[in-house]
């Protein structure tokens, strides 16, 4: 009985079938004439097509194109160079089996029936098993790194009750378990960060109001507050939580999501993101995005409810603009009476408004209250206790040179107001997809650093190299894109020229082919697009940078131990 | 060995030619196909991570010998078991049960060891931690033998059928060995029963021009499904989202679930098409494994249409022996839940699959209850029961959302409300058979499968949580420019439309009618062209079938 078309799997009754295998009709098969005609014809057609790829000669254009790692792009390059029938010679590139060897190992790139022939008969098994074991080791390390990067709790830094004495000396640094961990790649020129380390020392000593502030700009590599969130939590766990830091008034893109803060967009503001060059005046605010509303737009920023960080705030600083015919900006802290700011001004100008409160859980609402257009940038959330504030300033999708869209004077005022102790820049991911020489790129990057340091030319800066970016070669192996090492070297040279420290993220990840290993690890550290990191990967890179920074800090503390604290404070 | 690979082309052409050449010499043909199957199993490509070395084939051999011996021992007790002397019968029953036990312990022991050991160690550790105990459990570096879930079920069913008296044991070891290792279905199904396959070895091979043409047709359809709708969509979109869901918007995550739903079906059914097509060209008929599952009107129907050889296996060897639909309602619902739970857990050993299995099992329980319940006028008692039931459902989903998925309160409340709303909609929407009603039921069933795929695809529970949190964020960022290329959009829409809307007959008859008119060389050139497209689209090379890992 045939099943009802819509019968469910377990609806029917059991059907019992009895099969007797003792009877045998086994005999040679007979088949009518022509049984194999079509299938043999298909085999011949297929064989001829494959044979054609071997029959065509490999001209120069094909040989040149073959240097490209991806087959599709090699074929495209070849076809463009050999139009018309000459393009047939490009079939050379799609031969299914060649005797090419890997330049590193000298082994054949493709061995059919590898598990038997390559692994056993050609003796490739041992090397493959070593590589496999290394990959498994990498997995174990990845798991350990991801777990190590978790911060579960932290202690408040004790604020000193007594003022610093004239003759008080910087004490030796007490050993810390984090400093015993190996450093993947040390910072290059860590002495460029001495002023940052001095601020960190003041914070560490618990001097009243000693907040160490860092601003981390970058492209999508720092999106989702991944790497920055990891560094923030590590630094705050050790030096104290002085607040979440700067947050935009909205999400210019899906990857703008901060950890350790609650953001609620009741009614969105219109935004203009610097990478689109949409404000000719160049006033994008310190976060790179300006927000506008003629009334009704409202966001709320609250302290975090989960996790150890961001649970308290004592100071909200609203960053906005005064502008001709500017409207009202209404700020409401918790359930208190709202404060209404008149944003009207004779000309476009930078403004700030500070709301101080008790150190605890709070919510601030920022609303455009009508009366004209309001333009604002964001809110900085801080505390008054010693600690670290680490701003995530992601510019998703930005080429490095897009930062030059800032108006120089405006950015100077914005950064002066933020008063950072460290500027970190991590660009390059998007620059890998553009045409242009490295000389031009270096000039652009230098110009960006100079722009950001215009307010304070000695502001310590750290250039963080881009992540490894992978692509698959013709055999499917994930390899590093050739541009990556060029870009890393260019950034290294820029850092040196501008007197910045340099962190080689690419080398810290493991250098050539590392993205492939990170993608394959478990938990996966690299994302499937071979350009970004996963949640776990962010934590690992964040922890790597933290350890390198701390290595520099330990060295700094050794150097300044015994020197007067007051001299440190005046640094 | 992967079907969509140059290795397989190098392998299959000589295998077909020699097999046809030996069709008049059945003994040699069977021996040759056994040798070819073992070669197929051992000679896989270089993969990352490495697949088990060739000597893992020993497990396959062990399973073959084990069930061959056990089934013969069981059969030898047949006369004594049919005896009217109770003592003789009891002794025979004990012996039969002993050998059945040997087979079950041997097969399920191997499967359990390789597939579930680390999961159970993990569960032990999780439970211990939850109870406040500090326990360090080892993580074993086990290699899962390819196809073990498939060939284990295949050999088990043979022994159980002999034990149940529904099958006489295969007298010829070589034929039984071929039944276990027949390469087209060895590593990813369909799970073939002995009564479907072994009789074909007792008859002359059925070779015909029609079988050849249909076989080639199934292979071509399978390659297109597997490589383009399966692998390519994965490489272009879904893998990236599932690897780092926190980087994607709500809409992008939702789209990735649709894409994965299509990818999974195309991948597995494409593989099955190739297996069936190759078997046809070798003169064998394998059972179908899919019947337009995304056109099912309810979940029961979905599971009758999806991976049919697994779901019917568990129906025949778990559900019916437990009593099936006979017995008290409670017992029937338990039987149903357990069967569907096992269907889910067969796919993988992780908390994700515990959730996936329970979601589907409980939905199947609901499906049966909803179809069989009495629909009369509401009384105060029934209203009270409905309200209580809905509150319980709300509480259960809320609890799951907060405790397991670790969602925030608003998201948990939203998810619980959504579950209650869907329950009420489906419960209040009887199947009337009208076109609109059918379409609505198909869409509801389809979306249930789409959303539950979160747990099927995500690598771990943490990733599932991120996916669900991302979905429930309902952010307004839409889909970022350039993330999904027009080509991927086209393939996605075509694939979903094809599977949701086209009647099976259209493909089986009309498209095939066009195909069979093509001359052989044109078919060969088409295959070559398809190979070129696959080569260019998948620079990483075709992937292993998703079901390989099961």
Image (spheres, coloured by chain):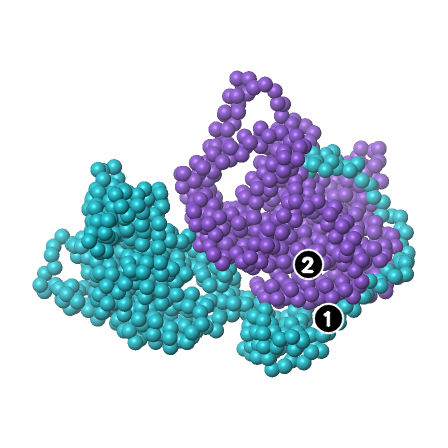
Q: In the image, residue A469 lies at what x, y percent?
A: 46, 67
Give the left or right position of residue A556, taking residue B247 as reference.
Answer: left
Q: Please give the name of the residue rendered at 51% of the width and 35% of the height, measured from the top-left corner.
A: B419
Q: Which residue is mark 1?
A: A49
Q: Nearer the viewer, residue B452 or A142?
A: B452
Q: Please give the name of the residue rendered at 50% of the width and 54% of the height, measured from the top-left corner.
A: B241
Q: Please give the name of the residue rendered at 68% of the width and 58% of the height, measured from the top-left corner.
A: B223
Location of the N terminus of chain B (image quadrant): bottom right
Answer few, some or many: residues within 10 Å of disc 2's Cα (few below 14, many 20 plus, some between 14 and 19).
many
Q: Which residue is mark 2?
A: B223
* Residue at the left extreme of this rendering: A166
Labels 1, 2: front one: 1
- In terms of image quadrants, where is residue B267? bottom right
Describe the element under mark 1 as helix, strand or loop.
Answer: helix
- In terms of image quadrants, where is residue B19? bottom right
- In terms of image quadrants, where is residue A427? bottom left
Answer few, some or many: residues within 10 Å of disc 1's Cα (few below 14, many 20 plus, some between 14 and 19).
many
Is residue B99 visible to us here?
A: no
Q: In the image, residue B117 lies at what x, y percent?
A: 57, 51
Q: Nearer the viewer, residue A426 or A353?
A: A353
Q: In the image, residue A61 lies at what x, y percent?
A: 59, 79
Give the left or right position of residue A563, taking residue A266 as reference.
Answer: left
* Residue at the top extreme of this rendering: B380
Describe the element under mark 2 as helix, strand or loop.
Answer: helix
Q: Is residue A172 above or below residue A240?
A: below
Q: Please give the name of the residue rendered at 21% of the width and 49% of the height, measured from the top-left corner.
A: A344
Q: Which chain is depicted purple?
A: B
Q: Is residue B306 above or below residue B528?
A: above
Q: In the image, residue A215 lies at what x, y percent?
A: 29, 60
Q: Which chain is depicted cyan?
A: A
């Amino acid at each position: 009985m045939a099943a009802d078309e819509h019968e469910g799997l377990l609806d029917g009754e059991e059907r019992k079938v009895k099969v007797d295998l003792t009877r045998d009709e086994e005999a040679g098969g007979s088949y009518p004439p022509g049984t194999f005609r079509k299938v043999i014809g298909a085999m011949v057609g297929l064989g001829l097509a494959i044979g054609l790829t071997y029959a065509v000669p490999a001209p120069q254009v094909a040989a040149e194109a073959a240097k490209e790692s991806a087959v599709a792009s090699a074929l495209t390059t070849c076809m463009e160079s050999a139009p018309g029938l000459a393009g047939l010679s490009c079939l050379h590139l799609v031969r299914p089996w060649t005797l090419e060897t890997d330049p590193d190992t000298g082994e054949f790139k493709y061995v059919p029936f590898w598990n038997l022939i390559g692994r056993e008969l050609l003796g490739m098994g041992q090397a493959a098993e070593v590589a496999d074991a290394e990959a498994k080791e990498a997995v174990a390390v990845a798991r350990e790194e991801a777990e190590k990067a978790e911060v579960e709790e932290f202690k408040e830094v004790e604020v000193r009750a007594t003022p610093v004495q004239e003759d008080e000396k910087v004490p030796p640094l007490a050993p810390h378990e984090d400093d015993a961990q190996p450093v993947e790649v040390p910072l290059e020129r860590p002495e460029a960060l001495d002023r940052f380390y001095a601020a960190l020392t003041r914070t560490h000593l618990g001097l009243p109001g000693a907040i160490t502030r860092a601003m981390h700009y970058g492209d999508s590599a720092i999106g989702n507050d991944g790497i920055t969130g990891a560094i923030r939590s590590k630094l705050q766990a050790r030096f104290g939580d002085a607040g979440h830091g700067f947050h935009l008034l909205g999400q210019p893109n899906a990857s703008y999501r901060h950890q350790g803060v609650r953001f609620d967009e009741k009614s969105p503001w219109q935004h203009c993101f610097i990478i689109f060059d949409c404000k000719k005046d160049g006033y994008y605010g310190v976060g790179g995005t300006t927000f506008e509303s003629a009334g009704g737009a409202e966001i709320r920023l609250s302290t975090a409810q989960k996790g150890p960080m961001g649970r308290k705030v004592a100071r909200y600083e609203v960053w906005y603009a005064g502008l001709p015919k500017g409207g009202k900006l209404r700020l409401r802290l918790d359930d208190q009476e709202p404060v209404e700011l008149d944003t009207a001004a004779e000309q476009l100008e930078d403004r700030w408004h500070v709301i101080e409160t008790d150190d605890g859980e709070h919510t601030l609402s920022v609303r455009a209250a009508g009366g004209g257009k309001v333009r604002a940038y964001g809110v900085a959330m801080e505390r008054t206790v010693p600690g670290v504030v680490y701003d995530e300033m992601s510019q998703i999708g930005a080429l490095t040179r897009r930062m030059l869209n800032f108006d120089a004077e405006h950015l100077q005022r914005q950064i002066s107001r933020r008063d950072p102790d460290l500027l970190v820049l991590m660009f390059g991911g998007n620059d890998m997809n553009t045409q242009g020489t490295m000389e031009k790129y270096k000039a652009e990057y230098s110009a960006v650093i100079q722009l950001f340091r215009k307010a304070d030319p000695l502001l310590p800066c750290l250039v963080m190299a881009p992540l490894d970016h992978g692509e698959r070669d013709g055999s499917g192996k994930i390899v590093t894109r050739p541009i990556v090492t060029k870009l890393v070297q260019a950034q290294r040279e820029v850092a040196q020229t501008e007197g910045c420290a340099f962190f080689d993220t690419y080398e810290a990840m493991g250098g050539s082919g590392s993205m492939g290993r990170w993608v394959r690890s478990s938990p996966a550290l690299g994302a499937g697009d071979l350009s970004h990191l996963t949640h776990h990967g962010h934590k690992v890179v964040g922890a790597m940078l933290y350890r390198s920074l701390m290595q520099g800090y330990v060295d700094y503390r050794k150097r300044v131990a015994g020197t007067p604290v007051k001299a440190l404070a005046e640094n | 060995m992967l079907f969509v690979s140059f290795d397989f082309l190098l392998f299959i052409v000589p295998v077909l030619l020699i097999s046809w050449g030996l069709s008049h010499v059945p003994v040699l043909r069977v021996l040759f196909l056994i040798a070819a199957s073992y070669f197929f199993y051992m000679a896989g490509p270089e993969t990352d991570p490495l697949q088990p070395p060739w000597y893992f084939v020993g497990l396959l051999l062990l399973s073959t010998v084990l069930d061959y011996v056990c089934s013969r021992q069981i059969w030898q007790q047949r006369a004594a078991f049919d005896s009217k002397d109770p003592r003789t019968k009891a002794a025979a029953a004990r012996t039969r049960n002993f050998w059945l036990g040997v087979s079950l312990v041997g097969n399920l022991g191997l499967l359990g060891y390789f597939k579930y050991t680390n999961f159970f160690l993990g569960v032990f550790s999780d439970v211990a931690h939850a109870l406040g105990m500090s326990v360090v459990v080892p993580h074993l570096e086990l290699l899962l033998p390819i196809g073990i879930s498939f060939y284990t079920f295949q050999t088990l069913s043979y022994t159980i059928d002999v034990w149940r008296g529904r099958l006489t044991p295969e007298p010829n070891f070589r034929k039984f060995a071929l039944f276990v290792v027949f390469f087209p279905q060895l590593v990813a199904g369909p799970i073939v029963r002995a009564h479907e396959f072994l009789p074909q070895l007792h008859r002359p091979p059925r070779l015909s021009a029609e079988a050849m043409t249909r076989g080639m047709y199934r292979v071509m359809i399978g390659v297109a499904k597997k490589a383009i709708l399966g692998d390519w969509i994965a490489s272009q979109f879904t893998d990236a989202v599932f690897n780092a869901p926190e980087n994607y918007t709500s809409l992008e995550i939702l789209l990735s679930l649709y894409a994965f739903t299509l990818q999974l079906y195309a991948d597995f059914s494409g593989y099955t098409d190739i297996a069936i097509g190759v078997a046809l060209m070798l003169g064998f008929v394998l059972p179908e494994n899919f019947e337009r599952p995304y056109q099912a009107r309810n979940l029961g129907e979905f599971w009758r249409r999806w991976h049919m050889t697994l779901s019917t296996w568990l129906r025949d060897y778990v559900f019916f022996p437990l009593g099936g639909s006979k017995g008290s309602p409670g017992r029937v619902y338990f039987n149903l839940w357990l069967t569907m739970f096992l269907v889910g857990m067969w796919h993988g050993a992780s908390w994700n699959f515990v959730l996936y299995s329970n979601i589907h099992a409980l939905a199947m329980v609901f499906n049966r209850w909803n179809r069989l319940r009495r629909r009369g006028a509401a009384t105060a008692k029934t209203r009270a029961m409905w309200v209580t039931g809905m509150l319980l459902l709300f509480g259960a989903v809320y609890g799951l959302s907060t405790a397991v998925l670790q969602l925030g309160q608003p998201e948990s409340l939203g998810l619980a409300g959504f579950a209650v709303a869907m329950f009420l909609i489906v419960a209040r929407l009887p199947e009337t058979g009208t076109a609109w009603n059918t379409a609505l039921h198909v869409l509801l069933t389809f979306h249930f499968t789409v959303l539950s795929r979160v747990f099927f695809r995500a690598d771990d529970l943490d990733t599932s949580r991120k996916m669900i949190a991302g979905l429930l964020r309902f952010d307004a960022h839409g889909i970022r420019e350039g993330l999904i290329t027009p080509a991927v959009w086209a393939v996605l829409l075509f694939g979903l439309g094809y599977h949701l809307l086209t009647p099976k007959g259209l493909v089986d008859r009309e498209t095939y009618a066009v195909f069979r008119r093509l001359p052989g060389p044109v078919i060969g050139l088409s295959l070559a062209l398809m190979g070129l497209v696959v080569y260019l689209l998948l620079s990483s090379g075709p992937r292993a079938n998703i079901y390989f890992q099961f």
